[in-house]
Amino acid sequence: MIESEQNRVIKIFHGPQHPGITGNMSVELDLVGETIQKARTHIGYLHRGFEKLVERRTIIQAFTIVCRICVPEPDPNEENFARAIEGLAGIEISERAKYIRVMVLEMSRLSAQMLWMGGQSGSVGLGTVAQWSIYDRDLILDLFEELTGGRVYHMYIYPGGVRRELPDGFLDRLTQFLDYLERRLPKYDNILFDNSTFKKRAIGVGVINPDEALKYGYVGQALRGCGIKRDVRKDNPYLVYDKLDFDIPTFEGGDVYARALVRRQEIKESIKILRQVIADMPTEGDIMQKIPKHRKFKIPKNDILVSCESARGEFNYYMAGDGTEKIRRMQVKGPSLIHGFTLLEKMLEGEELSNVAMIMNSLGICPPEIER
Amino acid sequence: MIDSLSKQYEIEDKGNRLFKIRINQNEFLRTINFIGSSSNFITLSQIACSDWIEDEVFILNYILTTDRRDKNLMIELEISREQSKLPTLLHIFPQAEVMERDLHEMYGIDFIGNLTLYDFALEDWNEIPPLRREFDTLAYVNEHFEFRAGREDNKDVKAETKRRRAEAKKLKAKKEAKK
């Protein structure tokens, strides 16, 4: 803590070691009393140089690190990486592989929403919710472990399809989990979404102006929480999302509470999508297309942009090939780049110190995807 | 919308609602302003940069997206690696501030008019900007960091694999000769 101007302005660093920070980052706050005058985001505590490392690796070598770009939600990274390579190399994957990928992405979305619920509730002092939601997330991780061999990082979605066939009875176990989660949701409503403590803290706090939201490039709940219906799965569909029936929930208000309600409804929509995937998934078809051996897998000289909708919003990958077996350039842009800087710094001005953790959680800021 | 732009620019349709136009550096601001005012590509979603050291250029792609978020437009331009300067887009897109800071740090590109090009992910970095192709990560690591104790017998994996393969081949040949 630094005191200055005759103790009038106090500067504190919220993070990187702070329970209310969403990962390895820090927000430098200038305070007068409890009110924030100025906020400045600092990153650099987790710079692992993925984008540089990828440039000296073959596809299979790069594939093992892309999932690490976002710890709570690695699968959108795998999907974007695979789809970018497929787009550049002209590979079309089977219908069955597309359905499996949608299943993995929606499971990943549920897992990320559960983790968010833990963080968001913890930021307002509702520790019990976190214990419940982290337990429920673990049940999804059990399914991931069975399917992919990994709990947090899956390395499952690979250019050409997916790496393993579904284990026997997997879809039944997934259905059982979805039934269980559906029964749990009213309990989460009682303990978090309808909880008067949470409402009092979250309503009217961290408000986003809808006029700025589109132009400034906000994504995910930041948009949908102020009534703007945007979702890559609907607006620019990929895989088999255009064949599935689901809604894009929106709420008015633009505050922390509206964003929380959007997420609550998105859990319901993900369950709906997963049930359709289980019912409609083709039983025939290769899960992996024939692709060149990895040392001979050359990426044509061209470039591409691919997007997918993560649990926190639009996730983009720009990729350029140069005709060799190594990727010339892979540039990642997740929701956190704009939310963690342009939006957060602006939003925190005039807010109370006690609301910082809650606002950060509501924006789903994940520092590793900023530093790449 | 794309049709109206095609009267002014040659547009490449890259599929999946992704389009590209290529422009010269001196057309940059005029193009961004024209597209911003005459189409609904209203959001700057990404500035992608790649280093083509063999051609001594950086290729930048300013990626704009529509208000419906259903189409993406890449505006591609080449700039010299040695004189890498471009005007900032901060006055049009506030989110450009952080993107330009990132590219300034990683490639050393100056964005004229952006006064906040200070440290982004790195701190007090005085080396070659790390995403330039000539920056050798491995050499940097070997020069600046020490392997932690207990790894003195660490071997080069490639060399070791080669050695073991050669040994196995020799052994196999010996066995066959004995037969």
Image (cartoon, rainbow, N blue to C red):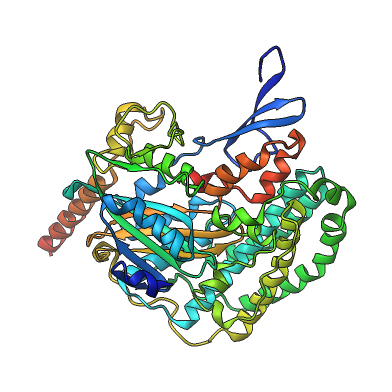
Label tally = 0
Give the farthest residue toward the top. Answer: A6
* Residue A171, above or below B92: below
- Horizontal and vertical percent for residue A115? 68, 54
- Horizontal and vertical percent for residue B27? 29, 53
Looking at the rendering, which quadrant does residue B146 occupy? top left
Specify whether residue A226 is in view: yes
Look at the image and tell me in which quarter the C terminus of chain B lies.
bottom left
Looking at the rendering, which quadrant does residue A113 occupy? bottom right
- Horizontal and vertical percent for residue A254? 71, 55
* Residue A144, above or below A346: below
* Residue drawn at (46%, 36%) of the image: B121
**Closer to the camera, A159 or A39?**
A39
- Horizontal and vertical percent for residue A363? 65, 50
Specify whether residue B64 is in view: no
* Residue drawn at (32%, 52%) of the image: B28
B175 relative position to A129: left or right: left
Give the farthest residue toward the right. Answer: A196
B122 relative position to A30: left or right: left
A219 relative position to B144: left or right: right
**Closer to the camera, B116 or A94?**
B116
* Residue drawn at (34%, 73%) of the image: B13
